[in-house]
Image (cartoon, rainbow, N blue to C red):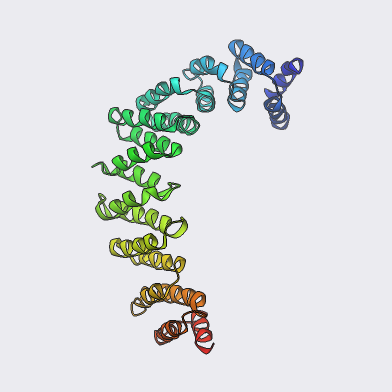
Amino acid sequence: MRRCVPVLLAAAAEDDALLATTAAETLEALPGESVDAELVQRLSAAEGALRLSLIQLVGRRTIRDAVPQLLSAADDADAEVRAAAYQALGETLDFARLPWLIERTIAARTAEERDMIGQALQSAAGRMPDRDACAETLAQAMDQAETPAKVKLLEALGAIGGERALEAIVQASTSPDAAVQGAAAQQLGDWMTPDAAPALLQMARDAADDRLKIRALRGYLRIARQFVVPDATRLEMHHAAMDAALRDEERRLALDVLIRIPSAHTLAEATKHLNNPALREAAASAAVTIAEKLAPEQPQAVTRAMQQVLNAGVDDPLRARAQELLDN
């Protein structure tokens, strides 16, 4: 297996894109530690296109023994080599060397360089086995970083997940720096558990500007609409969102939350907004959808609500659905 490596490496460095891609994919799939050792050995002495191919390859194969050469390549004069080295480090760097990548992120001199290193940091952080320890290391670095680097650290924290990462992002969400608040809102809005909801609601009420308040509220409504939470909690989130909303767009999303908790109470809650022209269609849609689920068990509540929908003057197909419920 190891004997075919030189031939495949030569092909991977060819100008023929199809040949180079096929060779690189074959090398990536070759099994065995002996192949890894051969690639690391060749990387030490490689130059030009071959060196670039080897850097990319050791990253895709996650060969951790290549990290010393990759650290050296991160300072190469060739921008393409540097970019490949950082990408490979994102796949190979261990926790002990994570502070090196954090320091590089903080020290980056240009936005392009910061993006490149920050992406490597995000990749590395996302695969660390002890995510709370990783999050603690990133959180401690926040105080040393300027705003652009803080944004990258927050992105890395978002890639980790977990309690400590969320705690650090929530703390950043109260920063007086609007850019840091915005980055925190982005991470909270993409959070994969409902734990982020309280911080998002707080931002929706107290963020530095209306743009951030709207972003935070939409993240909060995403949780209310898409995540598994108790019905009582979801109803509380509906009320909180309606109170915090600055625009009718978010109020319409908050009405959509009611569909997830069909009851006579939420049916009445939806119909309360039929007299508001900006919310009429959303309220009617929520009411009709809830009514279709409740009709067999709550005929009186459904009859009363559907008459209200018809009286509000909504158009088809909502009008037709409401009329059908009444007729039945």
Please provide percent x and percent y for residue 101.
42, 24
Residue sitting at the far front: 297
Please provide percent x and percent y for residue 216.
34, 52
In the image, 135 versus 181, the foreground residue is 135
Residue 257 versus residue 126 in the image, above or below: below
* Residue at x-position 48% and y-position 34%: 126
Residue 123 vs residue 246: left or right? right
Residue 190 versus residue 107 in the image, above or below: below
Q: In the picture, residue 102 is in which quadrant? A: top left
Classify the position of the C terminus by image quarter. bottom right
In the image, 88 versus 37, the foreground residue is 37
Classify the position of the N terminus by image quarter. top right
Residue 206 vs residue 294: left or right? left
* Residue at x-position 41% and y-position 21%: 100
Please provide percent x and percent y for residue 76.
49, 17
Q: In the picture, residue 269 is in which quadrant? A: bottom left
Please provide percent x and percent y for residue 251.
36, 66
* Residue at x-position 42% and y-position 68%: 258
Q: In the picture, residue 134 is in which quadrant? A: top left
* Residue at x-position 36% and y-position 30%: 136
Residue 168 vs residue 97: left or right? left
